[in-house]
Amino acid sequence: MHDPRELPAPAAPEVAFVGRSNAGKSSAINTLVNRRRLAFVSKTPGRTQLINFFSLGPAAFLVDLPGYGYAGVPGAVKQHWETLVGEYIANRDSLALVVVVMDIRHPLTELDRRLLDWLKSAGRQAHVLLTKADKLSKEGGKLALAKVRQALARDYPATSVSLFSSLKREGLDAAGAAMGRAVDAFRAQKTRAPPKGE
Ligand code: GDP
């Protein structure tokens, strides 16, 4: 079982990507990695459940968290996900933003909402990335975005959202802007109030 103490020491603000399996998280990361020429930094040990770190230039890291919500996963695997990712999200000092990747055709499922509730209670900044936008028409995409935006404004007012397509390489600027804003805000906050022990 993976031990969170094996993670690299926090060195710069981190933007973590999380999503239900098959939502399109790996594709979105690859698209952003190619765009930004991210360097692969480290892979924590473990068989299927890994936390991967990529450098986002010298100033930040992109962190790939294992997917959740596999149909029929045994309790032990589910528990492992919860322990591994729970630990990271709850305690990681350098975590600036959690990008929650959702398939635009199935946004805000019960599981997604549970995750957003948890992020909110942990005081974590979140951004919803509605990917596979190419599966809908332009109008359909706009409508889906508006609906999710409305639901977020009601239940998670601090959470932003944008459209994305790995296939068409669309939405990269909006995703990059959300990540940049969060990293800047995180840095400003750290400068104002350094955590204990620093
Ligand atoms: P993950 O399990 O969340 O990492 O999902 P993947 O990135 O592996 O993608 C799951 C499936 O969705 C794969 O078959 C991908 O080819 C497909 N997919 C991912 N992103 C897109 C996208 O933007 N557009 C389309 N049309 N398919 C996508």
Image (cartoon, rainbow, N blue to C red):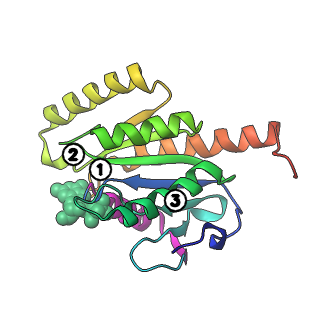
Residue in the image at 58% along x and 57% along y: 88
Q: Earlier in the sequence, mark 1 or mark 3?
A: 3
* Relative side of 65 to 194, left or right: left
Residue in the image at 30% along x and 46% along y: 102
The Cα atoms of the two marked residues, 2 and 3, are separated by 32 Å
Q: Is residue 148 visible?
A: yes
* C-beta proximity under 8 Å, tags 2 and 1: yes
Q: Quadrant of ligand 1?
A: bottom left
Question: Which dot marks residue 170?
Answer: 1
Dot 1: element: loop
In the image, is residue 119 above or below residue 152?
below
x and y percent of residue 12 in the render?
68, 58
Ligand 1 near label 3 (Cβ, under 8 Å)?
no
Q: Earlier in the sequence, mark 2 or mark 3?
A: 3
Dot 3: element: helix
Q: Where is mark 2, residue-wise?
A: 133
Which region shows up in magenta?
23-42
Discs 2/3, front: 3
Q: Where is mark 3, residue-wise?
A: 83
Q: Residue furthest right?
A: 197
Ligand 1 near label 2 (Cβ, under 8 Å)?
yes
Question: Of 45 and 173, which appears nearest the observer?
Answer: 45
Identity, as a three-letter code, of the amino acid under mark 3: Thr
**SS majority, magenta:** helix
The Cα atoms of the two marked residues, 2 and 1, are separated by 8 Å
The Cα atoms of the two marked residues, 1 and 3, are separated by 34 Å
Identity, as a three-letter code, of the amino acid under mark 1: Glu
* C-beta proximity under 8 Å, tags 2 and 3: no
Q: Residue furthest front?
A: 75
* Relative side of 116 to 192, left or right: left
Q: Is residue 142 found inside the magenta-colored segment of the image?
A: no
Q: Earlier in the sequence, mark 2 or mark 1?
A: 2
